[in-house]
């Protein structure tokens, strides 16, 4: 059983919502649905789901914009967001990761495969919550950069920022041991989890976004090896 985990499905096609809801509810998940991004944001703020499965192509507010708005809500920091995309859609995975998504699911998808992916994503959400509890009291302060793990925000030159969850976890990991070189494999395992398959450029996209926000002096690339944080 799912221990009453909450999932929000967002898609403008009713038949897809019904198909996915049926299969997830059979597994014991509590499922909420929305047919557009604006409603999805309202429901997410109220229900605080463990996982949001979000269609990319929607009227009014598409999935990319919806994801960006969801990632601005601090209480959803531990919620995993996965994009639902149709094969052949004009969709860039990089755009999805830049918006703050954790993963993507390609449709059509077989029920057993869907359930397997959802279980892996829910595990990722649980890992984030457990990790937050362990490091709750940690405050990393390096020069003009302060990382507050309890409040899930950073301060750069006295300006507070709320980062998308994966960007925050990646920065926290690198800054936890300044000077240490973290290999790409270590980063994937610590930030995304060993059971989750992500694209080769996922780390690069997140590093680029971090450099845009905190400056490019702190995070150094070691070509072919990984990244390190310098003071």
Image (spheres, rainbow, N blue to C red):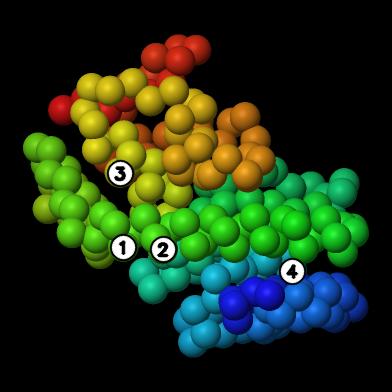
Q: Nearer the viewer, mark 4 or mark 3?
A: 3
> In the rendered structure, are the residues bearing label 2 and label 1 in contact, judged by CB atoms less than 8 Å apart?
yes
Q: Residues within 10 Å of mark 3 (few under 14, many from 20)?
A: many
Element carrying mark 2:
helix
Give the labeled residue for mark 1. Answer: 133
Element carrying mark 4:
loop
* Residue 149, image quadrant: bottom left
Q: Which mark is residue 129?
A: 2
Q: Residues within 10 Å of mark 1 (few under 14, many from 20)?
A: few
Q: Position of residue 184 (x, y in %)?
A: 49, 26
Identify the residue at horizontal 56%, vertical 84% (top origin). Answer: 43
Q: Nearer the viewer, mark 3 or mark 1?
A: 1
Q: Position of residue 141 (x, y in %)?
A: 12, 44
Q: Can residue 140 be seen?
A: yes
First in sequence: mark 1 or mark 4? 4
First in sequence: mark 3 or mark 1? 1
- Quadrant containing the N terminus is bottom right
In space, the residues marked 3 and 1 are separated at their CA atoms by 14 Å
Element carrying mark 3:
helix
Q: Residues within 10 Å of mark 4 (few under 14, many from 20)?
A: some
Front-most of residues 111 and 1:
1
Give the labeled residue for mark 4. Answer: 58
Give the labeled residue for mark 3. Answer: 172
Element carrying mark 1:
helix
Q: Nearer the viewer, mark 2 or mark 4?
A: 2
First in sequence: mark 2 or mark 4? 4
């Amino acid at each position: 059983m799912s221990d009453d985990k909450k999932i929000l499905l967002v898609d403008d096609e009713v038949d897809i919502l019904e198909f996915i809801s049926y299969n997830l509810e059979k597994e014991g998940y509590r499922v909420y649905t929305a047919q557009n991004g604006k409603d999805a944001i309202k429901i997410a703020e109220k229900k605080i789901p463990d996982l949001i499965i979000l269609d990319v192509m929607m009227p009014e507010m598409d999935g990319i914009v919806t994801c960006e708005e969801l990632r601005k809500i601090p209480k959803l920091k531990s919620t995993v967001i996965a994009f639902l995309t149709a094969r052949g859609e004009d969709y860039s995975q990089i755009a999805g990761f830049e918006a703050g998504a954790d993963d993507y699911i390609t449709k059509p998808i077989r029920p057993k495969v869907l359930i397997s992916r959802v279980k892996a994503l829910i595990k990722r959400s649980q890992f984030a919550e457990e990790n937050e509890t362990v490091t709750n009291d940690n405050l990393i302060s390096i020069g003009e950069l302060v990382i507050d793990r309890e409040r899930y925000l950073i301060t750069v030159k006295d300006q507070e920022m709320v980062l998308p969850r994966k960007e925050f976890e990646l920065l926290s990991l690198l800054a936890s041991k300044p000077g240490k070189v973290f290999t790409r494999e270590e980063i994937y395992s610590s930030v995304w989890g060993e059971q989750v398959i992500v694209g080769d450029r996922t780390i690069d996209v997140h590093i680029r976004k971090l450099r845009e926000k905190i400056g490019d002096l702190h995070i150094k690339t070691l070509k072919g090896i990984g990244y390190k944080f310098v003071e």
